[in-house]
Image (cartoon, grey):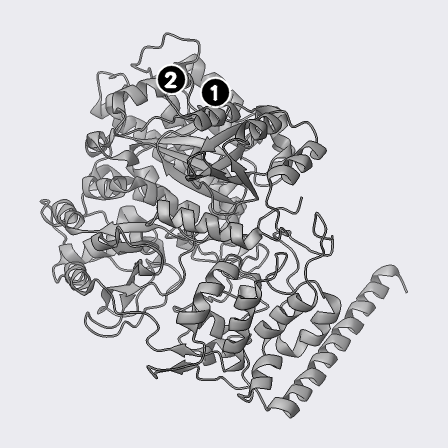
Amino acid sequence: MNNYTKRFALFILATITFSGCAVVAKHKLDEMYGPAQVVERTVVEKDYSEPEFYHDIKPIVDRRCVVCHGCYDAPCQLKMSSFESIDRGASKEKVYNGSRLVAGNLSRLTIDAGTTRQWREDGFFPVLNERAQSTTANQQASVMHRMLQLKQAHPLPETELLPDSFDLSLDRDQQCASIEDFDQFERDYPLWGMPYGLPAINPEEQATIERWLATGAKAKFPGIQPTKNPIEIEQWEQFLNGDSLKQKLMSRYIYEHLFLANIYFSNNLSSIGEDREFFKLVRSTTEPGQAIEIISSRRPFDDPGSDTFYYRLQRVKSTILAKQHMPYLFNPQRMQRWQQLFLDAEYTVTQLPGYDPELASNPFITFKEVPVNARYRFMLDEAQFTIMGFIKGPVCRGQVALNVINDHFWVLFTNPDLEVKYHTDVFLAKEAQMLRLPAEHESTALTPLTSWLKYSEMERSYLTAKQQRFDKVFPNKEMLDLSMLWQGDGHNQNASLTIFRHFDSSTVTKGLIGNTPKTAWVIGYPLLERIHYLLVAGFDVYGNAGHQLLTRLYMDFLRMEGEFAFLKFLPQATAEKEIDHWYRNAEDKVELYLKEMHSRNYETTGLEFKTKNPKVEFFNQVRQQYGNVVIPPDLINLQPFNSSVTSYQQQLQQLSQVRGKTLQHLPEQSLIYLQLDNDEHRLISLIRNRAHLNVSHLFGEQDRMVPKEQTFSVVEDVIGTYPNAFYRLTEQQLPDFVSRMSTLSSEQDYQQLLRLYGIRRNDKQFWAFSDAIHDHYLQSRPITAGLLDFNRIENR
């Protein structure tokens, strides 16, 4: 018997043994507590005296459990951000599966199944007791109770670092133990009680949750207060459900762009914590005034199944997570703006478009009768939100989509007035077939590499037609200058954006933050729309490997299109050097594509440059032209430094200049909780921007890193939603911290820094520190703040 045969035999034996143990455990539980069946957990008594979820448990679960169990990448799909998600339970199936050959089954809470019983039929198992409702059964037949007890019985070792038995990698094998498997789980992983890899919750919190579980894990109905916004909801639902073809097409466009938004109203601007109200724009089979019945579809442009449906605003009941939170304000000014753009504009809708995937996935066909000006200005008004869609969008782990971008770059936008003249509705309608997107294949693309070649030819054809159109519109070869860019109408800070990539997540913030980055994009309407329909509206996290790969490959075209639109503003010699630098060691087909499609012989910038660094000079001109209202100055990172900053900001300025291999010892995202001498506090983000030879390859990213070109950005705000490291400092300690971090030369140096200032994941003060940073975050950013995710905290 060879080694392979032996290993296979042992695997089969272990599987049979494990399955047999589970069967025995199930039989034993059935004998002791009766067979499992779904339990009704809602109560309506006003004077219910036992612990109840919304009043007693949710505040604890939010701060102690949801920080790891909140999104698609929650271990074992156990989301704990709402009562319904806890009652649903867990699953052994992974949402993130880059090798599946066919699209996975949808498991979106509140959308794809309506009841706990339906989730059981879909393979989810309970973490609450579903056997006889006795105190003993509610404890011993509950995975949640047993996990908490396991942590109490086996607390974290009092060592500097967690032992190697903890697997904290993103792609770790998940041990999704049901109650029938739990005895074996306890024997195999005694240290893996909950919270996993973090300190136990305090005795008072533990006692409250245990009593809740022992008394049946009940939740009051209704669990949340009536909305404070009934008038606003009525007005908006009336606006979005008009009868005319114009109104219907407008509402479809708005829905397909805002389906991920957490919508709020003006009276929420000063609300904090549980007082905040957010809403989702959904499609419902029921009309306004009736209970919402969501139409479940993979994508927002999928067929709703009926000609009669309604756009409704549904209250968000789950906890707000920073990694998913995309707030969007609905107010009278917004409604008036959309009335002006979509309804008052002079155009005619002759018929409503259908939902065939090949057509519905292409916005240039679906919305061809809506003026480009309306579409583009709609997206520009909240450009940060628009770009944030592919950063936070339908994914909580986006490395496949995000390894197509650099770690730090800036974004500007073309002038809408130019777009109206240059990218006319007729031109886009004519080129619509060349602007097709991978979502036309739905969620199962079978030949992504062959498709890449097809789409590359389409992109070539589109860019050729685009240049020909440019030559016709501007026959006198007008020079490109800053008038070609959207300058925020003199007040809108969405006119410039900074994107930070953190391996498999990313952040979009307004303004030009950090030192001048290696790359930048200039985005016009067709590019902005394609980014949205590629990575937001058209991306399916449950899609097969081909769909995800093709999406990633297509994004190469869009990145290059944005980059080369930026390079047109630089002198030709400078642009050629930049291209060579950005695409060092690029694959042959990428190099050929670049040479063929981006010859600049016919293009000349109209800007004058007086220094040896035109790229830096260009952005200085942009800042001056746009003004401080549109682009507020970056006081920390921008050189030459602003001398009027406070003493602690001067220290941060020094920190922002750390470069190169020193940064190798730091994680990608760190957060400082800084106590100033006046007892005020600040949250400071430290972002390590890795450097690549190029980002045009799907695989082998680690081999293309250039440590000596890394940069550091320091921001007085929360940047990133997956912090890797925490530091707690006083203003008096800041100079020493800056000095140590600026001179790191070894892992030992970094370990000493952590001993002095770090809050490690096994620190006894971890939860108190966590509460402090979340409280400060919420107080300082009441609309945009959400709970951070602790799944990526390092163990160093």
Let me know if residue 418 appears in the view: yes
- Image quarter in which the N terminus is found: bottom right
Q: In the rendering, at what x and y percent does residue 362 appear?
A: 32, 49
Question: Of all residues shown, which one is farthest toward the top?
Answer: 610
- Give how far apart the Cα atoms at labels 2 and 1 are: 10 Å
- Number of marks: 2
Q: Is 147 located above or below residue 656 in the figure?
A: below
Q: Is residue 373 above or below residue 24?
A: above
Q: Which residue is mark 2?
A: 570
- Lower sequence index among marks 2 and 1: 2
Q: What crowding class fits label 2: few (fewer than 14 Cα within 10 Å), some (14-19), or many (20 or more)?
A: many
User: What residue type is disc 2 on?
Assistant: Leu
**Residue occupying the point 46% across, 23% down:** 650
**Do the residues bearing badges 2 and 1 touch, measured as CB atoms within 8 Å?**
yes
Q: Quadrant of residue 641?
A: top left
* Outermost residue to the front: 678
Secondary structure, mark 2, is: loop
Residue 434, numbered circle: none
Q: Quadrant of the C terminus?
A: top right
SS class of the residue under badge 1?
Answer: helix
Quarter occupied by residue 58:
bottom left
Residue 451 appears in the rendering: no
Q: Position of residue 507 (x, y in %)?
A: 44, 41
Q: Is residue 495 left or right of residue 705?
A: left
Nearest the eye: 729 or 134: 729
* Disc 1 target residue: 578
Say which quarter of the image contains residue 609.
top left
Residue 638 at x, y = what percent?
42, 22
Task: Point out residue 42 in the picture as x, y percentages from the top left corner.
Answer: 40, 81
The residue shown at (74%, 52%) is 164
The residue under label 1 is which amino acid type?
Answer: Glu
